[in-house]
Image: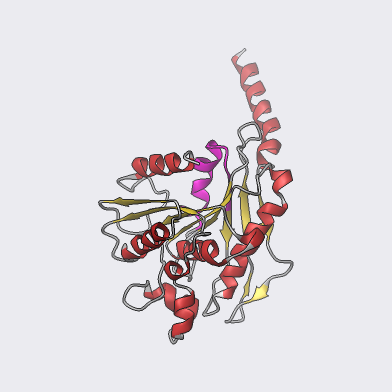
Amino acid sequence: MKKTNLILSLLFCLLALPSLAQRTFDINLWQAKAPNKNGLQDTAYIKVFLPDEKRATGRAVVICPGGGYAHLAMGHEGTDWAPFFNNMGIAAIVLHYRMPNGNAKVPVSDAEEAMRTVRRNSRAWHINTEDVGIMGSSAGGHLASTIATQSKDDAKPNFQILFYPVITMMQGYTHQGSHDNLLGKDAHKKDEQKYCSDLQVTRTTPRACILLSDDDHTVLPINGVNYYSELYRHDVPASLHIYPSGGHGWGMSPSFRYHAEMRMDLKAWLESF
């Protein structure tokens, strides 16, 4: 009898696999791979994680992992977030964007196309086109805030979630590696100002949730704090959570001392609107 039950259980699992597999898939954002500045082939794609249709709320979030615009932390700042959002009925779309190598338009165009792709597939993915947000960590936070403050129409998000974000490109406050990789070491002041997200905030900037650590010595907390101040000054709804410790780059890692609190704070914010 036990053997029969085991066989039936295994059979049930095998039958369930196709339906589960259909909920997670990859999509290339562009038709062909494009050579980057160094002549290497590179491409941008999204990893789509859809919640069970019965639990789907219609909300979606495009996730931009960090990595200083040099590489991508696709795990703890990307795909590891999928269960958290899916359990809330939220579709998680993790963006693998191309590295800029001094051309800021490259990752920006990838993020904008990711936003458009989500809205183009809204019916098939059970997504509300008026409830698509963007999230980013560190340099990915800079990319997310750039899209939130500068993109328009179908590329503009309805909300933003930023973890220990790079916000400014101004010397002395920026993360130098992100600055150099995005704009080049000899960037013009005009370009630096253009990609200072705190200088781009308007009254139409989408609501925000900003989370960071007080002892972050990699990306100075003043980045996120100044961004919050500008949101507040322009009457944009925003929440700022500063944890006593944790440094930089914790993402979804359970080793982060305030991991449980962070999850509750973010969940409460998402449920507030």
Q: Is residue 246 above or below residue 82?
A: below
Quarter containing the N terminus: top right
> Which segment is the magenta one?
74-93
- The image shows residue 94 at horizontal and vertical percentages of 57, 54
Residue 19 location, quadrant = top right
Q: Is residue 121 left or right of residue 264?
A: right
- Is 158 inside the magenta-drawn segment? no
| Closer-to-camera residue (244/248) | 244
Residue at the extreme top of the image, as rendered = 1
- The image shows residue 259 at horizontal and vertical percentages of 35, 44
- The image shows residue 43 at horizontal and vertical percentages of 64, 68
Q: Is residue 65 above or below residue 174?
A: above
Q: Is residue 8 above or below residue 199?
A: above
- The image shows residue 8 at horizontal and vertical percentages of 66, 21
User: Which residue does the image show at 47% across and 40% down from the upper left?
Assistant: 272
User: Which residue does the image show at 51% across and 57% down from the upper left?
Assistant: 74
Count of marks overlaid on the render: 0
User: Which residue does the image show at 46% across and 61% down from the upper left?
Assistant: 141
- Is 79 inside the magenta-drawn segment? yes
Q: Is residue 108 left or right of residue 179?
A: right
Q: Is residue 51 left or right of residue 222?
A: right
Q: Is residue 184 visible?
A: no
| Closer-to-camera residue (96/142) | 142
Residue 9 location, quadrant = top right
